[in-house]
Image (tube, helix red, strand yellow):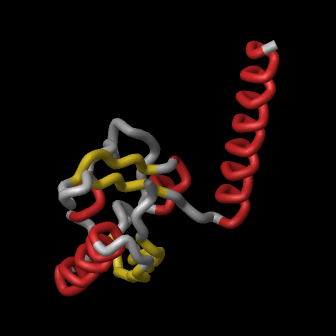
């Protein structure tokens, strides 16, 4: 019985993931997740394929799941404010909006925005 329940839950999660991928493809949106440890240090980064495409990259080989992949593209004058807003959301367990201009691999400028909040 547990196996059937686990299989059903796995199928639901896969269907939801497929819907999210379709939505990001249709809207030309990109998603990413940055995880921080409780002390505010970076734990892990996951760039979605849609985000990679928006940035002019194709896969993990040319845009690896590393924070430096992203940070080196942020306009220098936007970098501190953008990172500060992300960290504030995590450390204070609140939602903080941030925006930054990012120079994509293709040379065009991408406006990036989002919100950061702690998730436990």
- What is the total number of numbered labels drawn onto the structure image? 0
Q: Position of residue 32 (x, y in %)?
A: 46, 56
Compared with 66, 101 (above or below) is below
Q: Residue at x 72, y 42 (%)?
A: 18
Quarter of the N terminus within the rendering:
top right
Whether residue 68 is visible to the viewer of this picture, yes or no, is no
Please name the residue shown 29% across and 55% down the image.
Answer: 36
Quarter of the image that includes the C terminus: bottom left
In this view, the residue in front, 96 or 4, is: 4
Q: Relative to 118, is 43 above or below?
A: above
114 above or below 7? below
Name the foreground residue: 104 vs 30: 30
Whole-percent x and y of residue 110? 43, 75
Where residue 70 sits: x, y (%)?
29, 60
Question: Residue visible at 74% across and 45% down?
Answer: 16
Please tell me which residue is depicted at 44% across the width and 75% down the height of the picture.
112
Q: Position of residue 47 (x, y in %)?
A: 43, 50
């Amino acid at each position: 019985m547990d196996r059937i329940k686990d299989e059903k839950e796995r199928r639901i999660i896969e269907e939801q993931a497929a819907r999210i991928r379709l939505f990001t493809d249709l809207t030309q949106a990109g998603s990413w997740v940055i995880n921080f440890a409780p002390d505010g240090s970076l734990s892990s980064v996951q760039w979605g394929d849609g985000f990679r495409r928006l940035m002019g990259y194709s896969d993990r080989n040319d845009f690896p799941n590393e924070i430096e992949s992203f940070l080196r593209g942020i306009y220098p004058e936007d970098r501190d404010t953008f990172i500060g807003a992300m960290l504030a959301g995590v450390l204070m367990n609140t939602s903080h909006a941030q925006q930054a201009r990012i120079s994509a691999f293709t040379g065009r400028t991408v406006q990036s925005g989002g919100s950061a909040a702690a998730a436990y």
